[in-house]
Image (cartoon, helix red, strand yellow):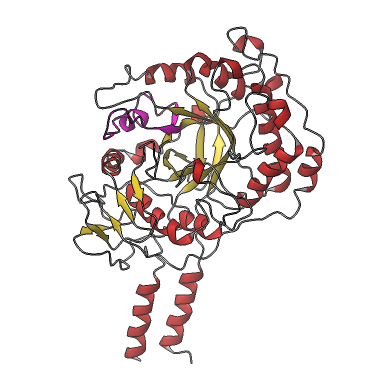
Amino acid sequence: MISLLQLAFVFQLLLVSAVFAVQSLKVEGSSFIDPSTNKRFQIIGVAYQPGGSSGFKPGSGSDPLSNGTLCTRDAAIMQTLGVNTIRVYNVDPTLNHDMCVSIFNAVGIYILLDVNSPLAGQSIDSADPASSYDSSYLSHIFSVVEAFKDYPNLLGFFAGNEVMNDETTITAVPPYLRAVTRDLKNYIAQNANRSIPVGYSAADVRPILANTFEYLTCAINGSKDDMTKVDMFGLNSYSWCGSSATFESSTYSQLIQILGNTTVPVFFSEYGCNKVAPRVFDEVQAIYGPDMDTVMSGGLVYEYSEEPDDFGLVKLHGNGTAQLLTDFDNLQRQYNKLDISELESANSTATGLAPPTCKSSLITGSTFDSKFQIPSIPSGGQGLIDNGISNPNNGKLVSVTKDIVQMPVYSTNGDALKNLAIKPLANDQSNTPNGQNTSGAESSSSSVGSSTGSATATGSAATPSASKGTAGRMEVSIGGLGAMMALLAWYI
């Protein structure tokens, strides 16, 4: 007869090897929807590119999603902050991202991913888009698709970021953005096992914003299945600056007028003006409040790590340690005020919207392209779509067996955080703010049975240990399971 110890050992293996997944989201009209609950998904996110674009060095063997130890640290910090989405700008599709993506998946965090990179030949040249749109470029962006398409917590791909940023780029570039969108969507349809949204991240340049939005979100011939139309529209906007700003003075009210009739999910793909420091993030209440949440699907704060431009929430050090900054505390306080149940309420009108038909009257002015004549796929491109790229590096979820953060993380007052670890969520759950106060500074109290991790500030070096799981959640803690095993062995 099997002993209690043997049973416990089997149970431990089951726990450690279990791979829980968030539910892949779908687009319905102007909303992201969780198909398991039919609830609306609002992006509560941060931009995540430690080292910045200058730190992206393919061939070095690392990118933001390649080091599981560092991802455990950052996922644990983000889980306490309450975010459910990260945006990653540059990745090396030849690397293994399984552990990092699985870690973020385990804690209920989705990933928005840019397919382009700052390297030559790996993005559309805004000055000469025709010369950069070739099969070599398509091979690169398709390799990014292959590397990430099988992860359920991949929310979507950005086909471009601020490719149109002034009046000189609005004549030649627009058709190529729709062409790249088409090619990505066709590749996904042919080579992925699910639909994955493809969108564009626009610069908040008001003279061209309305035309950019109308051009990319309309449907040629009125077909909602038009593959050249974006599935989502992101906006990088920094117009709300400081505590004195309001919905009107920040011109957020004007943005809602421009974007108000959207038929695709619209969100801030970057926000968080730092002209007034420290940032207080009062705009969070507007973005997720009644003036905007019927139009906007949330947003991503720029940015997680402190870089030379001083937008960071967390200071990362070369030895792997990290320190929370004042902006982190301020943002957490704002997130803790959000009514998540209200934000998740689906709007049946929003989910049933049909795109407008593309026509020249949608575009104002004489220089923005209004012909909607989309370039044909370049030579060799259709073969890549039909047959897939050669030797794809396909990612997959793997077991997350280490939950404890391995290096010290310090609060804003310099105290080390104790008990910092990722807290894997039950299947189909995404992370949400829960009133937690990571740094120990004054804020609202923590909720019982919440879905985010916990950490407390102490004056000594971090010595995190596993905490008990709450109802509805499976927690993978090797240390905790080991202790259980030892106790059972002693008992027997």
**Horizontally, is 413 left or right of 392 in the view?**
left
168 sits left or right of 137 in the view: left
Magenta stretch encompasses residue 291: yes
- From where the camera sits, is residue 432 visible? yes
Residue drawn at x 45%, y 56% is 71
Residue at the (56%, 48%) spot, across then down: 57
**Vertical comparison of 349 with 96: above or below:** above
Counting from the top left corner in percent of width and height, residue 110 is at 48, 47
Viewer-proximal residue, 82 or 278? 278
Looking at the image, residue 235 lies above or below residue 334: above
Is residue 355 at all visible to an observer of this figure? no
In the image, the segment drawn in magenta is 269-297
The residue at the far top in this view is 366
Q: Quadrant of residue 254?
A: top left
Q: What is the x, y in percent for residue 219?
A: 66, 23
Q: Quadrant of the C terminus?
A: bottom left
Residue occupying image coordinates x 75% and y 49%: 389
Q: Quadrant of residue 421?
A: bottom left
Q: Is residue 63 above or below residue 479?
A: above
Q: How many marks?
A: 0
| Residue 224 x/y as whole percent | 66, 27
Mostly what secondary structure, the magenta segment?
loop
Residue at the image position 42 percent from the left and 81 percent from the top: 8
